[in-house]
Image (spheres, rainbow, N blue to C red):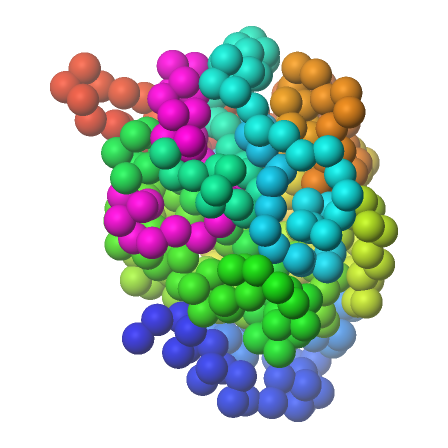
């Protein structure tokens, strides 16, 4: 049994019918209940929850401080390559797009690492287009060997791997995985992924479980909001996270809520997601899963991100670029999508501090005996 089996069980229920049956009284019950079930979660995502968003925000804030303290962890993405063999209709790296393709050499990776490390960041997320030929596991291992001289925590956002490949990268120094299902509705998924290995819905959906079985430290999942009805996608993202928390209690599970941004190819989302929709998603996730990490990237504006900090967010990117080699020289390189919040790491740290939170650059340290000790980032409420 995997989440593939679980999601088919969930899909046997009529999602629209369940949403329509939600009553306002269920929202109040959910807000007063310390332990929520999936029907409570669904109720918090329903239109009936909108009048009570302020109450939900207060509860979400208290829960987040209780479990994570007054902290926001910072990281930045590093794009290694944009070669891709998939034809995802919404992505700037789509194999059909006529864009300059390149891959960083190891010396260029080191230069990127040096520039990023100077900002103080110690958590990094490395990304590639989905091409095993150009971004092989061997190449990624070589890059990790360079990067671990500068960063104690390295996560990957690449094509889905077999379990033994995740174990191989972990042995090289990787400790985190980010992988978005993009769309949980399988029929919509097939339509948006017409060609390429990414079309294999099940292999991608089960990737977090393979990484978890290999012993990865952190797993970050999510749906790309705008590709399908946001309520059903956030609901299934939350159910996926709950499933992973249950079977991997020692692994840090997080959910990202990325919204479609302008990109090469100019794909327009069929299901726009408003700021209020995003806020409702964050609040519902926090109340349903109090210990889940919630990540908001630089896809969102600086003003919105600052306002989301107190609603349940625990992790944010800073000083971001989606272009290959974008931290040093991105001339002639087209990013995967346009970022919105272009603040530097220093500016982000200042903004977080001004809101009364502590920007966390590193949440664990190495011991001389070779093990890793994970430091609690909790700070008592002020």
Task: Determine whether, in the image, residue 188 is placed left or right of residue 130.
Answer: right
- Quadrant where the image shows the C terminus: top right
State the extent of the magenta-drawn residues as a range. Answer: 139-167
Task: Determine whether, in the image, residue 233 is placed left or right of residue 365.
Answer: right
Name the residue rendered at 22%, 19% in the picture: 367
Pinpoint residue 186: horizontal percent, then vertical percent: 57, 75
Task: Determine whether, in the image, residue 368 is placed left or right of residue 82.
Answer: left
Name the residue rendered at 43%, 15% in the picture: 150
Above/below status of 213 relative to 360: below
Does the image show residue 20? yes
Does the image show residue 283? no
Pinpoint residue 40: horizontal percent, then vertical percent: 55, 75
Q: Nearer the viewer, residue 275 or 116?
A: 116
Above/below status of 263 relative to 347: below
Q: Nearer the viewer, residue 168 or 276?
A: 168
Quadrant position of residue 90: bottom right
Quadrant position of residue 67: top left
Name the residue rendered at 26%, 34% in the picture: 171
Pinpoint residue 137: horizontal percent, then vertical percent: 39, 39
- Quadrant where the image shows the N terminus: bottom left
Q: Nearer the viewer, residue 31 or 317?
A: 317
Q: Residue furthest left?
A: 369
Pinpoint residue 248: horizontal percent, then vertical percent: 30, 56
Name the residue rendered at 52%, 60% in the picture: 197
Q: How many marks?
A: 0
Task: Determine whether, in the image, residue 257 is placed left or right of residue 367.
Answer: right
Look at the image and say whether residue 131 sits in the magenta stretch: no
């Amino acid at each position: 049994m995997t989440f593939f089996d679980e999601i088919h069980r969930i899909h046997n229920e009529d999602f629209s019918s369940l949403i329509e049956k939600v009553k306002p009284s269920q929202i109040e019950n959910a807000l007063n209940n310390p332990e929520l079930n999936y029907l409570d979660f669904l109720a918090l995502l329903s239109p009936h929850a909108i009048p009570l968003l302020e109450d939900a925000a207060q509860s979400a804030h208290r829960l987040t401080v209780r479990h994570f303290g007054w902290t926001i962890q910072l990281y930045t993405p590093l794009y290694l390559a944009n070669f891709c063999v998939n034809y995802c209709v919404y992505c700037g790296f789509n194999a059909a797009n006529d864009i300059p393709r390149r891959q960083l050499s190891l010396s260029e990776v080191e230069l990127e690492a040096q520039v990023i490390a100077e900002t103080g960041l110690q958590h990094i997320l490395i990304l590639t287009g989905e091409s095993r030929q150009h971004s092989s596991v061997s190449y990624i291992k070589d890059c990790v060997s360079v990067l671990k001289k500068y960063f104690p925590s390295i996560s990957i956002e690449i094509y889905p791997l077999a379990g033994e490949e995740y174990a191989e990268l972990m042995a090289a120094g990787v400790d985190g995985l980010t992988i978005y299902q993009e769309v949980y509705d399988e029929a919509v998924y097939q339509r948006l992924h017409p060609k390429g290995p990414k079309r294999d819905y099940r292999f991608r959906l089960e990737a977090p479980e393979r990484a978890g079985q290999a012993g990865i430290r952190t797993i970050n999942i999510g749906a790309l909001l705008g590709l399908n009805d946001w309520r059903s996608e956030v609901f299934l993202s939350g159910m996926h996270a709950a499933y992973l928390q249950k079977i991997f209690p020692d692994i840090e599970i997080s959910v990202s809520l990325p919204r479609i941004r302008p990109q090469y190819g100019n794909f327009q989302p069929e299901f726009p997601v408003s700021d209020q929709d995003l806020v409702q998603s964050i609040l519902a996730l926090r109340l349903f899963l109090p210990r889940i990490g919630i990540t908001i990237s630089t896809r969102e504006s600086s003003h919105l991100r600052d306002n989301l900090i107190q609603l349940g967010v625990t992790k944010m990117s800073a000083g971001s670029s989606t272009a290959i080699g974008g931290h040093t020289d991105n001339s002639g390189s087209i990013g995967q999508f346009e970022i919105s919040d272009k603040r530097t790491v220093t500016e982000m740290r200042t903004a977080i501090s001004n809101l009364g939170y502590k920007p966390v650059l590193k949440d664990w340290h190495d011991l001389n005996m070779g093990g890793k000790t994970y430091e609690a980032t909790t700070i008592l409420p002020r």
